[in-house]
Amino acid sequence: MSLRQYLCYVDGQFIENQSGRWIDVINPATEETLYQIPQGSKEDAERAIAAAKIAQPGWEALPAVQRGGWLHQLAAGIRSRAAEIAAIIVAEGGKTQPLAKTEVLFTADYLDYMAEWARRYEGEILQSDRADETIMVFKKAIGVTAGILPWNFPFFLIARKAAPALLTGNTIVIKPSELTPANAMIFADIAHQIGLPAGVFNLVTGFGPEVGQALAASPEVGMVSLTGSVGAGIATLETAAKNVTKVSLELGGKAPAIVMNDADLDLAVKAIVASRIINTGQVCNCTERLYVQEGVYDEVVQRLTAAFLAVTSGDPALHETVDMGPLISADALKRLEDKVALAVQQGATVVTGGKRKDSRGFFFEPTLLTNVRQEMAIVQQETFGPVLPVIAFRTLDEAIALANDSEYGLTSSLFTENLNTAMQALKKLRFGETYVNRENFEAMQGFHAGWRKSGIGGADGRHGLEEYLQTHVVYLQAH
């Protein structure tokens, strides 16, 4: 039986695979090949950019409320196929069924949310130093934009990039991850079924060094938004710099969590465990290192040990209530095994887990590490898996210094019942986001943006919308 072959979507049509090369997409829970996608080329990317460029002036000419109406139609189409999309996300990404369903419905909600900005984003009128002069600041579309997506939240990230881009009058070319592409094909099919004007939304599959770099290198692309690794972000910056193209990057994270002696430990442990097992620990904004004040250190480690041992894992397509699925790939599994082995070699103690689970599928046990030191790679480098190193501290200032000691600056979290302690920490923590007494999950109306090597620019809310706008200042002198 031949495998299903998906096609790229360019200029309102699913196009034949011009290169004749195909990429196998693997189910990480079973290691079986699911289907194939085109290994797109530079020429495919350029064809999509050309279509987006032709479509953009007419799209921008529509009233914003009409563009928002198309987003509402996309959201409705997603809800009508939610079960189908969620099943694909589970199969190709190893995500649990509840999380996949949440991602799909959150994506639809996000499109509706961004659509409602149609009547709300504004320009400005400024006071002039001259008599009879009016200074106006127009907010205008950038033109053609490009979105380069990761595999960990593949469906939501389409909307996070496309919704603000389209709402503000831009057109877009999306490159999904080659590891989780089929959900994006369904998004394109929904766009096609509702009759979204040709060229407004385009989808090209392939590898980053070929398709992604072609998008970043094009002088016709006004903005590139990438979510991915630091290495991919640097490569995109270097390529885009040749045309001084605007770049928005959400890159890695090494989120610290601080637990004070006065914390609600039931709440803290529940949130921290969720941070390590959600999507098998493959979430850039979730806790990757834990600092616990000495007075509750032993109790927190004891509670975490019990919680980690109670985590269930397995093929999420077969087990609706399983806590954790597999890692995304064999490479991801090997990297995690190597990172834990290095930590042990450097003196860390494995309290739970520490090794691969099962011989089939890319499963790894929830792993708790103690006797770790701040300078260890397991504390400094992004892990992206269900591994948690724990370090004790004495004072709040010490904890903040340890938390800030990172090349990353995406998110952080704090657990305390003392408002004064929280306010002191919030003034000193150097991260794009801090969660106090709650799980690490951002709101669509917030602004998801990192400091340091965690990125440039950001997404969500009004500030995320304005990433896709540029200013045109007009000085109007009356006579």
Image (tube, helix red, strand yellow):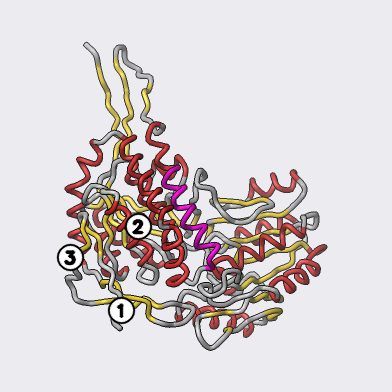
Residue type pointed to by label 1: Leu
Q: Amino acid at mark 2?
A: Phe
Mark 3 is on which residue type? Answer: Glu
Above or below, 41 relative to 162 = below
Which percent across, then down, holds residue 196? 27, 48
Q: Which mark is residue 293?
A: none
Q: Is residue 102 magenta?
A: yes
SS category of the residue bearing label 1: loop
Vertical comparison of 70 with 303: above or below: above
Instruction: Give, as a single range, the part of the protein colored magenta.
Output: 96-113
Where residue 183 appears, x then y in whole percent?
Answer: 38, 63
Write down the residue under mark 2: 187
Q: Which residue is at a point 22% across and 69% down the rendered structure image?
A: 41
Q: How many marks?
A: 3
Label 2 crowding class (10 Å Cα cut-off): few <14, some 14-19, many 20+? many
Q: CA distance from mark 1 to mark 2?
A: 21 Å
Q: Nearer the viewer, mark 1 or mark 2?
A: 1
Query: Camera-side residue: 135 or 180?
Result: 180
Mark 1 lies on residue:
3
Q: Nearer the viewer, residue 152 or 222?
A: 152
Residue 407 visible at all:
no
Circle 3 is placed at which residue position?
43
Q: Which residue shows up at 40% across the image and 52% down it?
A: 159
Which secondary structure class fits the magenta region best? helix
